C-alpha cells in the first residue's frame, strides 16, 4: 500500500474502536430493545416471547402509565426550575466573584460526585425524615403542620432530583460565564445599561450556550431517573423510570418495559429538539 | 431617560487632585487637569504611567481614591458609569459578539428607551463609512471596521466627552495612519471633546491639539505637540516624545540673554528663554535631527556650537541616515542627517564635528549624579519613519 493510501485510511482506523464500541453496546442492544417492544405481550420469560409485531404495546403502555409519564416531566421540570434559581447565581458567583476561592468552590460543587448516587440519595432520606432536624425546624416555624412531612412527598422527590443533578447544570454554566469578557460588561455600563439591563442584554445572552447545555444535561437524566422517587417517594410519586424498572426486574414484562423505554426516549428527544429550536442563538430568543 | 444626567451644554472636563491607589501602588497621583470643551486631548505615556486609570476614572469604571472629576460645574466623581454623559471606545473595542453591527451601535440609544433608532444608526454608520454593514456580526469585520463600529457605538450617544483607550493600538501601521486621519476628521465634524490615551507619541502628536505627557501617575508636561517637542520640560519628556541628546552640564546662572554651561570640559551656551534651569546640575539637550555633521570645524555656520567625534554607527532609513558619534569623553551622540544632498554616507570611523544652532538647544534640570542621557539607539524618530 502506498504511503498516500495509508494516509487516507488513517482517519477511519482512528474511528474504528469507537464505532465498534457503539455498534456492540449501543446499536445492537437498541435494536434488541426495539424488537422486544414488539413481542407478543402474552408471552413471558419462562415460556418465551414470540415476535408478533405487536405495535399495540405502545398505546397500551401509554394508557396504563401516562400519569407516571406526566409526573416524570413535571418533577424534572420543577427540579430544573429550582436548579436554575440556585445554579445560575452559584455559577455566576464562582465564575466572576470568587477570586482565589474559585477552584475550591468548583471542587465543592463536584465533591458529592465522589460518593455514590445511592449513598447521596439515602443521605437525603435522613435529612428529610420525619424526626430529622429539617422537618423539626419547618414545623417550629409553622411552615409545616404538626403532622406535616417532607419524606414520601413530591417535594422530597423534586428536592432529591435538584440536588443530584445540580452539578450538571452548574458546570457548563460556569464554563460559559467564566469565558465572558468583563470588558463587555464595562462597555454595557458605559453605554447606559444599568446593572440589571447589563445582565439581561449581555450576560444572559452570552451565557446561553452554557445554559442550554446545562439544562439538557440536567433535564434528560432527571426525567429518566427512578432512584429519587424510589428512595424519597412512595408509589404515588413514582416516575416513568420506576415503571420501566419494575417492568424489567419485577413484573418481567419485557415487551411493556421496552415499549415504555422507547416512548420515554421519543418524548425526551421531542422535548430536546423543541427546546434547541427555540434556543437557537441565531433566533435571538431564549 | 433613566435619571441620567441631562445633556446640558457640558463645558470643560476638569480633574481636581485625582488620585487612585491600588493597594500600595499609586497609579494616579494628585492629577489636576483641564480639558477644554471640543478639544482633542491626548494622555501620552509609557504603560503603567496611570493614563488608562485616569481615563477609567472619567468613565466611572474606576473609583478614585480621592479627588474629583468635573464636567462643566457638575461633579460626576461618584456617578455610576451608566449615568455619565461620557462614552468610551475601548482598547479591544469590546463589541457585543451576540449582536450585529446595527444593534451594537443602537445599544446606548435603546438603553435610554429610545425606540426608533434606525435613522440615527444609519447616519452614524455612514459617518464612520460603514454603510450597509448593519446586519453583520462583529466577528465578520476586520480590525479597522470593528474599530469604527466601536466609534459609532460611542458617538451615537452624543457624549459630552468621548474617551478613547489606545483606540488604534490593535491596528497595523498603515491602517493606523488612515484611522488617525479619520478620527481627526470625525472629531472636527462632531465637535465633541475627545480624550485619547496612547503610548504612541506619533499618534498623540498627529491627532491631538493638546498633549499631556504622563509618567508615574503625574503629568510631566502639558501643551501643544510642537511646543512640547521643541522645548521639553523634563528629561523624561525629552526622550519619550521623540529622542534627545542630553549632556550632563553645569550652569552658573544666566549671563545676559544667554546661559553659559560647561559640559565635559567644553563651554556652550543656550538662550535664556530655552533654559528650564540655569544654575547647578543641568542637562544640555539637542534633538538628533538638529545636530549637523561636518568634516572639520572650519567653516561652521556663524554662532553654531560644536563637539568633535568619530562615527561609530550609521543606519540608512530612507528619509535620513542616523549616525552615532562617539565624543572625546566617550559619550555617544545621535544625529539624524536628512538624505537631501548628493553626498554619500559617512563611513564608520570617520572623524566628524557635530554642530548645532544654540537656539535649538535647551537646558533641563538634572539630578546631581546623573550623567549623559543618550538618545535611544537609532529608533525611528518622529516624522522620519519610512
Image (cartoon, coloured by chain):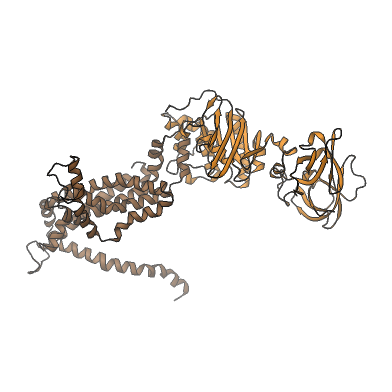
Q: Quadrant of the N terminus of chain B?
A: top left
Q: The chain drawn orange is chain what?
A: B
Query: Looking at the image, which residue is at 33% across and 51% down?
Result: A170
Residue B337 sits above or below residue A244 on the image: above
* Residue A30 in which image quadrant: bottom left
Camera-side residue of B361 and B110: B361
Residue B245 lies left or right of residue B204; in this view the side is right
Query: Looking at the image, which residue is at 59% across and 43% down?
Result: B168
* Residue A205 in which image quadrant: top left
Q: Colour of chain A?
A: brown
Residue B220 sits above or below residue A254 on the image: above
Camera-side residue of A217 and A53: A217
Residue A36 lies left or right of residue B249; in this view the side is left
Q: Position of residue B334 (x, y in %)?
A: 78, 49
Q: Position of residue B187 (x, y in %)?
A: 60, 32
Query: Looking at the image, which residue is at 54% across and 43% down?
Result: B91
Can residue A134 be spotted in the picture?
Answer: yes
Amino acid at each position: 500500500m502506498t504511503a498516500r493510501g495509508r494516509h487516507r485510511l488513517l482517519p477511519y482506523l482512528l474511528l474504528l474502536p469507537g464505532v465498534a464500541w457503539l455498534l456492540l453496546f449501543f446499536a445492537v442492544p437498541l435494536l434488541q430493545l426495539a424488537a422486544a417492544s414488539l413481542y407478543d405481550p402474552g408471552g413471558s420469560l419462562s415460556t418465551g416471547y414470540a415476535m408478533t409485531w405487536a405495535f399495540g404495546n405502545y398505546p397500551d403502555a401509554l394508557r396504563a402509565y401516562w400519569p407516571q409519564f406526566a409526573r416524570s416531566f413535571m418533577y424534572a421540570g420543577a427540579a430544573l426550575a429550582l436548579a436554575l434559581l440556585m445554579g445560575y447565581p452559584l455559577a455566576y458567583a464562582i465564575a466572576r466573584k470568587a477570586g482565589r476561592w474559585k477552584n475550591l468552590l468548583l471542587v465543592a460543587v463536584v465533591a458529592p460526585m465522589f460518593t455514590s448516587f445511592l449513598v447521596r440519595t439515602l443521605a437525603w432520606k435522613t435529612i428529610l425524615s420525619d424526626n430529622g432536624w429539617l422537618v423539626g425546624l419547618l414545623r417550629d416555624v409553622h411552615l409545616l403542620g404538626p403532622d406535616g412531612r417532607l419524606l414520601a412527598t413530591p417535594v422530597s422527590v423534586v428536592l432529591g432530583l435538584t440536588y443530584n443533578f445540580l452539578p450538571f447544570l452548574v458546570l457548563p454554566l460556569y464554563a460559559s460565564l467564566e469565558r465572558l469578557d468583563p470588558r463587555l460588561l464595562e462597555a454595557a455600563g458605559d453605554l447606559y445599561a444599568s446593572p440589571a439591563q447589563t445582565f439581561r442584554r449581555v450576560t444572559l445572552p452570552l451565557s446561553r450556550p452554557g445554559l442550554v447545555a446545562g439544562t439538557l444535561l440536567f433535564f434528560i437524566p432527571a426525567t429518566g431517573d427512578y432512584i429519587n422517587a424510589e428512595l424519597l417517594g412512595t408509589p404515588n410519586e413514582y416516575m416513568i423510570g420506576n415503571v420501566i424498572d419494575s417492568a424489567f426486574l419485577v413484573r418481567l414484562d419485557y415487551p411493556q418495559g421496552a415499549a415504555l423505554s422507547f416512548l420515554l426516549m421519543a418524548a425526551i428527544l421531542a422535548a430536546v429538539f423543541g427546546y434547541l429550536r427555540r434556543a437557537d442563538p441565531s433566533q435571538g430568543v431564549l | 431617560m433613566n435619571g441620567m444626567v441631562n445633556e446640558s451644554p457640558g463645558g470643560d472636563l476638569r480633574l481636581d487632585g485625582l488620585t487612585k491607589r491600588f493597594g500600595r501602588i499609586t497609579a494616579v497621583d494628585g492629577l489636576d487637569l483641564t480639558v477644554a470643551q471640543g478639544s482633542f486631548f491626548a494622555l501620552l505615556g509609557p504603560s503603567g504611567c496611570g493614563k488608562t486609570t485616569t481615563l477609567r476614572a472619567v468613565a466611572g469604571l474606576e473609583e478614585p481614591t480621592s479627588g474629583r472629576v468635573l464636567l462643566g460645574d457638575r461633579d460626576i466623581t461618584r456617578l455610576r458609569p451608566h449615568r455619565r454623559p461620557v462614552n468610551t471606545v475601548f482598547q479591544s473595542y469590546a463589541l457585543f459578539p451576540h449582536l450585529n453591527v446595527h444593534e451594537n451601535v443602537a445599544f446606548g440609544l435603546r438603553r435610554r428607551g429610545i425606540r426608533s433608532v434606525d435613522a440615527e444608526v444609519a447616519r452614524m454608520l455612514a459617518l464612520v463609512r460603514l454603510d450597509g454593514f448593519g446586519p453583520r456580526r462583529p466577528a465578520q469585520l476586520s480590525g479597522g471596521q470593528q474599530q469604527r463600529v466601536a466609534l459609532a457605538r460611542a458617538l451615537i450617544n452624543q457624549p459630552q466627552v468621548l474617551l478613547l483607550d489606545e483606540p488604534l493600538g490593535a491596528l497595523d501601521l498603515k491602517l493606523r495612519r488612515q484611522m488617525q486621519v479619520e478620527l481627526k476628521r470625525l472629531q472636527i465634524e462632531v465637535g465633541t471633546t475627545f480624550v485619547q490615551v496612547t503610548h504612541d507619541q506619533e499618534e498623540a502628536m498627529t491627532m491631538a491639539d493638546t498633549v499631556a505627557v504622563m509618567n508615574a501617575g503625574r503629568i510631566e508636561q502639558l501643551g501643544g505637540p510642537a511646543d512640547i517637542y521643541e522645548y521639553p520640560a523634563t528629561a523624561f519628556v525629552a526622550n519619550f516624545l521623540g529622542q534627545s541628546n542630553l549632556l550632563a552640564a553645569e550652569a552658573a546662572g544666566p549671563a545676559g540673554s544667554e546661559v553659559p554651561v560647561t559640559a565635559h570640559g567644553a563651554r556652550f551656551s543656550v538662550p535664556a528663554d530655552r533654559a528650564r534651569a540655569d544654575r547647578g546640575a543641568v542637562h544640555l539637550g539637542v534633538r538628533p535631527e538638529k545636530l549637523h555633521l561636518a568634516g572639520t570645524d572650519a567653516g561652521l555656520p556663524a554662532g553654531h556650537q560644536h563637539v568633535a567625534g568619530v562615527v561609530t554607527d550609521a543606519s540608512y532609513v530612507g528619509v535620513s541616515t542616523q549616525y552615532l558619534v562617539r565624543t572625546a569623553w566617550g559619550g555617544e551622540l545621535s544625529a539624524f542627517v536628512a538624505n537631501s544632498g548628493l553626498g554619500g554616507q559617512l563611513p564608520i570611523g570617520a572623524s566628524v564635528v557635530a554642530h548645532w544652532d544654540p537656539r535649538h538647544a535647551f537646558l533641563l534640570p538634572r539630578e546631581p549624579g546623573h550623567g549623559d542621557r543618550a538618545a535611544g539607539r537609532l529608533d525611528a524618530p518622529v516624522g522620519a519613519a519610512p
